[in-house]
Image (cartoon, coloured by chain):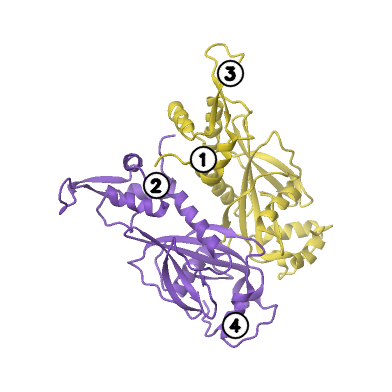
Chain colours: A purple, B yellow
């Protein structure tokens, strides 16, 4: 791995170390207490926000690149990132952003610089508890903050489209693989699980259908305890059966055809 | 678009027209009468088979590249191709294949040739009726043929992994979007639809669960006619409600949560 000490060094030497014309963008969704957010950077000297993004070292596996980029640009580590799409419209790149970064660093960029070529970008996404992670901006960025999914600021290039595609993927994944571990307390109620799904889906769900569906997946253990300190009709507590949870992550829900 | 008249011209001039270090591989699944196959090329002067693959012109949308590559390499057109994954292991490339092609054309390749670099590859897949299409090999290949999914020949590079990932994607898609239009006759029986699913999934399904599930999606019209010429208990015929079918393709099945 190479340490670049300035934007100018990055511009001059990056082309030697990174694969050409291909980048990675990370869509980090944050959930907590009924809120769904996205992690965005404010690009230095440019009016819109952007996703944490970066490049692939010539000898690096792309999954490792995604992890490293997320760490370098936001300080987040140990995040389970999943590739979801590659964005390949030839019009998706906006060299004005790169030029703005160069300008702030006092550099005039020649048109054939490696950073000013057409880039395809590989989208990776993750879902974390935004109260449990501490994100911080890198030297390309002024801020690194969580934004409500329903109230995003203007985004650079095709990043709004990348976020929407990631959200669609996350919602689709709810249909065939489990979610919730690390986002809910170890013991949770069915309404808490339902609230997580409703927040991700952005819609209200039928209570009975939801419960029937969740129980049919076989990943929940109903505990003998009930939630304490509730006035009346204390709800039952559940926990994930982690063995079955991870099996379902690997193989998808084996619900009856 | 550029016409390359030989492998040597391709080697010498391709780097000027194509994006560097990124290719496209097409996994074309063929279904007919209870059989699932994959379309493979025999690589000239090389012992294993490979997927139809190619490169992206510098100004071309990647979806357009996938269509063009499939047409150029197999003669297939009007195929609905879907991107499913990008393969980015730095060890996935095998320069021996390129060298074998070069050798057959009487070329010694210098190590810095654009075709001998590390390539990421974008996987696209499609599902067609193999009786309705007529595939033919291009000048890189000796044959272009359908192979049973359960009996594939040795495949070049990571192409076996690419086929498996495409198959997993196809099977997963069955959970939330419709399949069957263009693969079944306009009027079909429930057992015929079930046979299609069983062939793709590679497993037997419960008849009653399957019927209940299919009807719950709201994409089928039950016709008044029954299949004729059957000895006794003639089965009902169904057709797809194409408006609802295409809506479900766009939005996924809106089955109750």
Q: Quadrant of the N terminus of chain B?
A: bottom right
The label number, if any, that marks residue A124 in the structure image? none
* Element type where label 2 sits in the image: helix
Tell if the residue under mark 1 belongs to the same chain as the one under mark 3: yes
C-alpha span from label 1 to label 3? 27 Å
Which residue in the protein does label 1 denote? B174
Task: Tell me if mark 2 has few (under 14), some (14-19) or many (20+) residues whose alpha carbon lies within 10 angstroms of its own.
Answer: some
Mark positioned earlier in the residue sequence (4 or 2)? 4
Looking at the image, the residue that sits furthest to the top is B231
Label 4 or label 1, whichever lies nearer to me, is 4
Label 4 or label 3, whichever lies nearer to me, is 3
Is residue A179 visible from the viewing direction of this image?
A: no
Which residue in the protein does label 2 denote? A248
Label 1 or label 3, whichever lies nearer to me, is 3
Tell if the residue under mark 4 belongs to the same chain as the one under mark 1: no
**Marks 4 & 2, CB-CB < 8 Å contact:** no
Q: Residue at x 15, y 47 (%)?
A: A232
Task: Tell me if mark 4 has few (under 14), some (14-19) or many (20+) residues whose alpha carbon lies within 10 angstroms of its own.
Answer: some
Label 4 or label 2, whichever lies nearer to me, is 4
Residue B110 vs B33, above or below: the answer is below
**Marks 1 & 3, CB-CB < 8 Å contact:** no
* Element type where label 1 sits in the image: loop
Of A63 and B229, nearer the camera is B229
Q: Residue at x 74, y 38 (%)?
A: B134
Which residue in the protein does label 3 denote? B225
Image position, residue A152 (x, y; %): 47, 65
C-alpha span from label 2 to label 3? 41 Å
Q: Is residue B101 left or right of residue A129?
A: right
Which residue in the protein does label 4 denote? A102
């Amino acid at each position: 791995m190479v340490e670049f000490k300035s934007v100018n060094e990055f511009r001059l030497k990056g082309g030697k170390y990174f694969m050409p014309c291909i980048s990675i963008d990370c869509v980090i969704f944050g959930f907590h207490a009924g809120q769904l957010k996205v992690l965005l950077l404010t690009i230095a000297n440019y009016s819109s926000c952007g996703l944490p993004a970066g490049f692939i070292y010539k000898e690096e596996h792309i999954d490792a690149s995604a992890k490293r980029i997320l760490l370098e640009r936001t300080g987040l580590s140990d995040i389970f990132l999943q590739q979801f799409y590659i964005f390949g419209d030839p019009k998706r790149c906006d060299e004005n952003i790169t030029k703005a970064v160069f300008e702030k660093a006092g550099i005039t960029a020649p048109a054939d610089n490696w950073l000013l070529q057409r880039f395809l970008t590989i989208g990776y996404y993750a879902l974390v508890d935004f109260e449990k992670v501490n994100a911080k901006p890198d030297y390309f960025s002024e801020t690194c903050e969580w934004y409500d999914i329903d109230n995003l600021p203007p985004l650079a290039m095709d990043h709004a489209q990348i976020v929407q595609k990631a959200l669609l993927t996350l919602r689709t994944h709810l249909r065939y693989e489990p979610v919730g571990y690390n986002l809910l307390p170890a013991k949770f109620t069915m309404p808490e699980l339902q609230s997580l799904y409703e927040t991700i889906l952005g819609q209200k769900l039928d209570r009975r259908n939801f419960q029937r569906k969740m129980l049919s997946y076989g990943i929940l253990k109903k505990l003998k305890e009930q939630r304490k300190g509730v006035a009346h009709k204390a709800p039952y507590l559940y926990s994930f059966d982690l063995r079955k949870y991870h099996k379902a992550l690997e193989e998808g829900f084996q619900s009856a055809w």
